[in-house]
């Protein structure tokens, strides 16, 4: 059973000709804190339907509802997560969100540094989702007069941005972003540049799986302490949901 499921995608030149296509990736931490690469599959345009196919494949293989599902803000992906795992907490990648906010600000290094520091201080200094939301809403207020688009970006979907703080606080930096998955995808992209274009989807997916498996397997697990394990067991017991495939059926 998964404590956290992480979902992301990369666009690669899958075939000798034609546009790049989406390669969808799923990996996670089990409730014992172990890392596991779950799936690498083709998703032509990263649509809701593509993510649903990936998720339904995982469910058919026996995956029960994760406690937490973390992703970026792609609308199709969010819709699929909500449909596939309605009982899971949905988390928004905090790193992606910060990038989105900074992209809506003038390119002034001092301003970016100040907003970045305030953003992480609100998340790092909080002991609960509610406390983090209060801190981030203060930052929303500071941004709203001069940078309303950046303020609106930060204010959107705050519960998903802070939900990781409902889990053992020692794990918060591991559960709040898709960073490890992004590093894996960057390594795939780097190796793809050497190849140029793949001869077909089998070679593309095989290489992507092999590279990401190396990166994820080489990273450390959560190293759960006994209090962490007790807290996670309590979350599982409190959730007490039937398997997701039963809900979908």
Image (cartoon, helix red, strand yellow):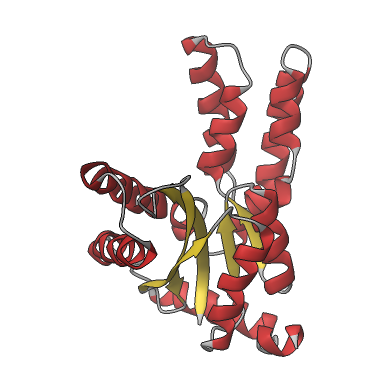
Indicate the quadrant where residue 27 lies.
bottom left
Residue 155 locus on image (x, y percent): 74, 36
Residue found at x 64% / y 50%: 162
- Side (left or right) of 50 relative to 221: right
Q: Is residue 130 in view from this perspective?
A: no
Residue found at x 34% / y 45%: 186
Residue found at x 68% / y 80%: 239
Q: Is residue 176 above or below residue 166?
A: above
Residue found at x 50% / y 82%: 1
Q: Is residue 197 above or below residue 48?
A: above
Residue 152 locus on image (x, y percent): 76, 30
Q: Is residue 215 above or below residue 151?
A: below
Query: How many discs appear?
Result: 0
Residue 178 locus on image (x, y percent): 47, 52
Q: Is residue 81 in view from this perspective?
A: yes
Q: Is residue 97 above or below residue 104?
A: below
Indicate the quadrant where residue 82 lies.
bottom right
């Amino acid at each position: 059973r998964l404590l956290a499921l992480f979902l992301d995608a990369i666009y690669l030149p899958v075939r000798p000709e034609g546009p790049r296509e989406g390669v969808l990736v799923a990996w996670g931490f089990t409730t014992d804190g172990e890392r596991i690469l779950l799936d690498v599959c083709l998703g032509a345009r990263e649509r809701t339907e593509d993510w649903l196919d990936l998720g339904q494949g995982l469910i058919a293989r026996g995956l029960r509802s994760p406690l937490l599902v973390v992703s970026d803000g792609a609308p199709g992906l969010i819709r699929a997560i909500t449909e596939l795992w309605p009982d899971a907490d949905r988390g928004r990648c905090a790193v992606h969100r910060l990038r989105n906010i900074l992209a809506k600000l003038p390119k002034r290094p001092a301003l970016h540094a100040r907003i970045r520091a305030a953003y992480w201080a609100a998340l790092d200094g909080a002991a609960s989702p509610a406390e983090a939301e209060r801190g981030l809403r203060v930052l929303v207020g500071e941004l709203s007069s001069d940078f309303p688009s950046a303020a609106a970006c930060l204010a959107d979907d705050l519960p998903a941005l802070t939900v990781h703080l409902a889990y053992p606080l020692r794990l918060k930096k591991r559960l709040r972003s898709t960073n490890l998955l992004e590093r894996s995808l960057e390594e795939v992209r780097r190796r793809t540049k050497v190849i140029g274009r793949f001869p077909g989807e089998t070679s593309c997916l095989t290489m992507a799986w092999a590279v990401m498996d190396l990166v994820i397997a080489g990273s450390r697990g959560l190293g759960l302490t006994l209090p962490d394990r007790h807290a996670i067991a309590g979350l599982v017991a409190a959730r007490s949901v039937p398997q997701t495939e039963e809900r979908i059926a």
